[in-house]
C-alpha cells in the first residue's frame, strides 16, 4: 500500500441520508471491497467500523461523524478515499454540517424501500447549502418491496430533472444480482462473493436501458460544444469521454447521477466507488474557504478562497474534535494548503495558541492508521491539541486572525437540567461541559441561578451528551425538566421603608431608607434613581442601597421569581455616625424593596419565543392547529423559497418543552424548526 505522501489524489466523501437508509452498511461494504476489512460487520450486532461508540452500538444508529480511509485503484492510479459516515438523526445535524465543510462530494443514500423521506430532503438541502457536489446512491435494492424506478421518480419529483440514473438494477428485491451500466450499455453481474463480470444486457431491460442511454448521452453532450457537434454529426462519444464531461457537470452542481447497490450483499458497491472516484471532484480541484481578519470572538472578516496547493503555506482546518477516554482530545482535520508533518509548529489563527503537531494518523472508525504527512486536500487526525477546538485554523503565520467559514446556525430546541451526583462530579462539571460543547457546538450550557441547563437539538442529542459526560469525562449527573424562566413585575407604584437596627454590644447595625418602586416599560430591566437631598443618606452608602435593591429583585418577588422592569427610587433615609455601614444600607434596601413589592402586588410574566416552522404545504394546516392549541399567535404564514410553507408564531415557553418531538411526530420528520427567545408578557394560562 502506498505511503500517505505518495497518494496522488484524494477524495473526501460524506455519506448523507435519512436514518435507516443504509449509510453505515454502505461504508462497511466499501471498506470490504477495498480490502481493509476481511469481513463485513453488522449495524444490528454493533460490529461495524463506523458505528464504534458505545452509545451508537446501543442505539444501532450513527451519532457523530466517523472517518474511514482506504485506497482504491482506478484507471491504473491509486486514489486515497476518506469516507465520512454521518448521522441521519435530525438531532445530530451539526455533525453533517462539519463534514460538509471538508467534503468534495456528498453521496446521498436513499433506501429503495422507503424512498424519499424527510431525512432525504434534509440531506439534499444541507449538501446544496454547503455547495458540495452530489451523487445519489439507492440502497436496499435487495430487500422486499424495493422499487428502484419508483424511487428515481420520487427523487426527480422532489429535486428536479437534473438527476440522471447511470444504472439500472438487474432483478429486484431478492432477485437483485447486478447492474446495467447506462454509459457503457453493459451488464455487471455479481456472484456471491461480490465480484462481477460483464455480460450483454438482458433482453427484458435492453429497450429501457437504451432509451435511458440516449437521454443521458444527450444531456451530457449538451454541456460540451465539441461533443455536441460531433454527436449531431453521428459520432457518439465514448463512455470515458461522457464520464469526463459529466464530472464537470457534477462538480458545478448541474447534474446529480443516481446509482444503485446493495451494501449488505455487496452488489454494485465497487462500481459505486468507481463512479465516486471518476465523477466526484478531486481535492486538488476544490478550493477551501476561510474568513480572514476576524476579531477575538471570530466575528467579522472577509471571505477568501484557498487553493489546494501542496507547495503553498501550511493551512489546516480542524473541523471536529472528539473526546477520547484513552488518548484525550482527537482533532479531525483537513489540510487546505501546504503539507502537515509531525513536529511542525503552527499557530491557531482563531485562538492565538501555539501548537506543536504530534504524530499524525488516519482514522478508520476507532482504528488509528499512522501517517507520515498530510498533503493539501487530505483528511486525517491528530491527538492532544489542547488549545485547538473544533472550528479552528492552524497556520505558519506569526500574526493575524482567521477562521473557517461559519457553520449554519442550529439553535437549541430542547433542554434538561443537570444535577451532579456527588461533590466530585460538581467540581468537574464546568470543565467537562466546556469539553463537551467544544466537541459539539450545537450543545449550549445555560446557568439560571444554581441550576445548570443543557440545551440541544432534541432529546436524543441531550441524552447522548449526558451519557458521554459520564463515560468519557467521568462526570455523573441526574437530569430533570428544565424550568421555565418566569419573571415578575409590578403594575402600580408603591412606597415602603427599609429599616435595620441592631445593637448587641460594640458597634451596631443601623440604616433606614425610604424607597419607591414603580413600573418600567416591558424590556427596560432595572433603573435606580437617587432623590436624596440634604445628605440624609451619605453619598458613600448610595451604591450599597442600589446593590441591595438589585439583589432583592433578583432573589424573587412574592411569587418566587426574579422581578424585572422596575424602577427603585431612594427618597430619604437615616444614618448613624458609628453604627451605619455599607452592609447595613444594603440589607435595609433589600428589606424595603421586598416590602414595596408586597404592597405593589406583582404580576407573573412568562417568556415567549418566536417559533418558525417550515413544512410541506399539505402539513401547514395541522401545524397551525397545533400551534393554536399551544396558545400560539401566528404572525405570518407564507411560501418559503423552496415552495414549502413557512409559519412564524409567538408561543409561550411553557408550551414548548416537547414541541420539537411532537412536531417531528406530527410531520413525520419533514418539518424544520427554530426557536428564538423574544419577550416576556403577562401569563395567561398553562403551567406556572
Image: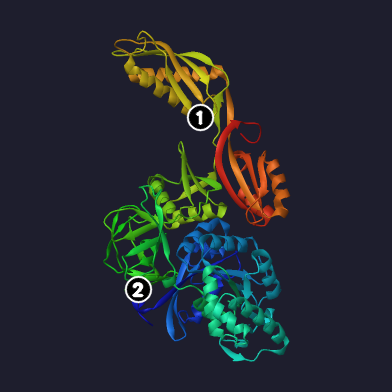
Q: Position of residue 241 (x, y in %)?
A: 53, 83
Q: Quadrant of residue 630?
A: top right
Query: How far is the residue under mark 2 from the one under mark 1?
Result: 56 Å
Q: Secondary structure at mark 2?
A: strand
Quarter of the N terminus within the rendering: bottom left
Quarter of the C terminus within the rendering: top right
Q: Is residue 589 above or below residue 327?
A: above
Q: Nearer the viewer, residue 562 or 298?
A: 298
Q: Nearer the viewer, residue 554 or 244?
A: 244
Q: Secondary structure at mark 1?
A: loop
Q: Is residue 454 above or below residue 238?
A: above
The disc placed on residue 562 is 1
Check disc 2: other Cα within 10 Å, few if <14, some if 14-19, many if 20+.
Answer: some
Residue 384 shown left or right of residue 642 in the figure: left
Instruction: Name the residue rendered at 71%, 72% in the picture.
Output: 150
Residue 139 seen in the figure: no
Amino acid at each position: 500500500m502506498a505511503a500517505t505522501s505518495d497518494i496522488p489524489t484524494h477524495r473526501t466523501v460524506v455519506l448523507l441520508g435519512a436514518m435507516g437508509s443504509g449509510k453505515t452498511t454502505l461504508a462497511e461494504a466499501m471498506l470490504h471491497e477495498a480490502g481493509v476489512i476481511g469481513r463485513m460487520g453488522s449495524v444490528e450486532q454493533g460490529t461495524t467500523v463506523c458505528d464504534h461508540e458505545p452509545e451508537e452500538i446501543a442505539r444501532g444508529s450513527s451519532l457523530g461523524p466517523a472517518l474511514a480511509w482506504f485506497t482504491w485503484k482506478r484507471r491504473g492510479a491509486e486514489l486515497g478515499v476518506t469516507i465520512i459516515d454521518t448521522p441521519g438523526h435530525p438531532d445530530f445535524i451539526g455533525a453533517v454540517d462539519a463534514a460538509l465543510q471538508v467534503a468534495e462530494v456528498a453521496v446521498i443514500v436513499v433506501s429503495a424501500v422507503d424512498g424519499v423521506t424527510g431525512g432525504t430532503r434534509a440531506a439534499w438541502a444541507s449538501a446544496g447549502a454547503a455547495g458540495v457536489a452530489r451523487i445519489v446512491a439507492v440502497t436496499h435494492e435487495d430487500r422486499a418491496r424495493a422499487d428502484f424506478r419508483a424511487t428515481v421518480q420520487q427523487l426527480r419529483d422532489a429535486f428536479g430533472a437534473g438527476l440522471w440514473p447511470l444504472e439500472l438494477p438487474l432483478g429486484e428485491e431478492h432477485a437483485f444480482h447486478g447492474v446495467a451500466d447506462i454509459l457503457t450499455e453493459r451488464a455487471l453481474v455479481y456472484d456471491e462473493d461480490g465480484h462481477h463480470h460483464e455480460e450483454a444486457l438482458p433482453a427484458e431491460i435492453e429497450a429501457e436501458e437504451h432509451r435511458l442511454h440516449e437521454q443521458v448521452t444527450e444531456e451530457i453532450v449538451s454541456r460540451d460544444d465539441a461533443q455536441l457537434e460531433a454527436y449531431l454529426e453521428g459520432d457518439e462519444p465514448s463512455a470515458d469521454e461522457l464520464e469526463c464531461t459529466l464530472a464537470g457537470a457534477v462538480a458545478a452542481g448541474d447534474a446529480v447521477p443516481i446509482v444503485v447497490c446493495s451494501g449488505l450483499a455487496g452488489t454494485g458497491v465497487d462500481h459505486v466507488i468507481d463512479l465516486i472516484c471518476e465523477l466526484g471532484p478531486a481535492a486538488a480541484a476544490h478550493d477551501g474557504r476561510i474568513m480572514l481578519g476576524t476579531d477575538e470572538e471570530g466575528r467579522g472578516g472577509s471571505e477568501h478562497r484557498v487553493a489546494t496547493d501542496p507547495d503553498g503555506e501550511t493551512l489546516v482546518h480542524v473541523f471536529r474534535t472528539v473526546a477520547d477516554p484513552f488518548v484525550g482530545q482527537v482533532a479531525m482535520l483537513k489540510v487546505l494548503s501546504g503539507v502537515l508533518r509531525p513536529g511542525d509548529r503552527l499557530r491557531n489563527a482563531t485562538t492565538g495558541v501555539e501548537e506543536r503537531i504530534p504524530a499524525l494518523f488516519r482514522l478508520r472508525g476507532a482504528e488509528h492508521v499512522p501517517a507520515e504527512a498530510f498533503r493539501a486536500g487530505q483528511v486525517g487526525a491528530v491527538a492532544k491539541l489542547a488549545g485547538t477546538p473544533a472550528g479552528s485554523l492552524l497556520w505558519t503565520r506569526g500574526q493575524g486572525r482567521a477562521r473557517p467559514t461559519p457553520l449554519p446556525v442550529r439553535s437549541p430546541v430542547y433542554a434538561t437540567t443537570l444535577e451532579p451526583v456527588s461533590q466530585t462530579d460538581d467540581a468537574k462539571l464546568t470543565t467537562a461541559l466546556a469539553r463537551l460543547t467544544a466537541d459539539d457546538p450545537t450543545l449550549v450550557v445555560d446557568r439560571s441561578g444554581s441550576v445548570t441547563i443543557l440545551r440541544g437539538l432534541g432529546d436524543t442529542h441531550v441524552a447522548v451528551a449526558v451519557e458521554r459526560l459520564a463515560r468519557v469525562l467521568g462526570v455523573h449527573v441526574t437530569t430533570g425538566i428544565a424550568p421555565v424562566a418566569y419573571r415578575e413585575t409590578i403594575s402600580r407604584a408603591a412606597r415602603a421603608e427599609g429599616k435595620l437596627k441592631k445593637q448587641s454590644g460594640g458597634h451596631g447595625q443601623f440604616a433606614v431608607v425610604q424607597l419607591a418602586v414603580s413600573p418600567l416599560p416591558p424590556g427596560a430591566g432595572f433603573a435606580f434613581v437617587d432623590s436624596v437631598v440634604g445628605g440624609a443618606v451619605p453619598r458613600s452608602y448610595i451604591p450599597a442601597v442600589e446593590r441591595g435593591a438589585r439583589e432583592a429583585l433578583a432573589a424573587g418577588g412574592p411569587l418566587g421569581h426574579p422581578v424585572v422592569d422596575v424602577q427603585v427610587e431612594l427618597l430619604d433615609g437615616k444614618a448613624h455616625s458609628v453604627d451605619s455601614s455599607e452592609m447595613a444600607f444594603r440589607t435595609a434596601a433589600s428589606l424595603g424593596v421586598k416590602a414595596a413589592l408586597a404592597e405593589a402586588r406583582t404580576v407573573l410574566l412568562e417568556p415567549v419565543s418566536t417559533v418558525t416552522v417550515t413544512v410541506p404545504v399539505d402539513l401547514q394546516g395541522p401545524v397551525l392547529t397545533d400551534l393554536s392549541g399551544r396558545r400560539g399567535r401566528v404572525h405570518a404564514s407564507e411560501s418559503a423559497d423552496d415552495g414549502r410553507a413557512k409559519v412564524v408564531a409567538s408561543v409561550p415557553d411553557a408550551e414548548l418543552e416537547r414541541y420539537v418531538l411532537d412536531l417531528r411526530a406530527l410531520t413525520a420528520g419533514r418539518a424544520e424548526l427554530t426557536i428564538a427567545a423574544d419577550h416576556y408578557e403577562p401569563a395567561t394560562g398553562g403551567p406556572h
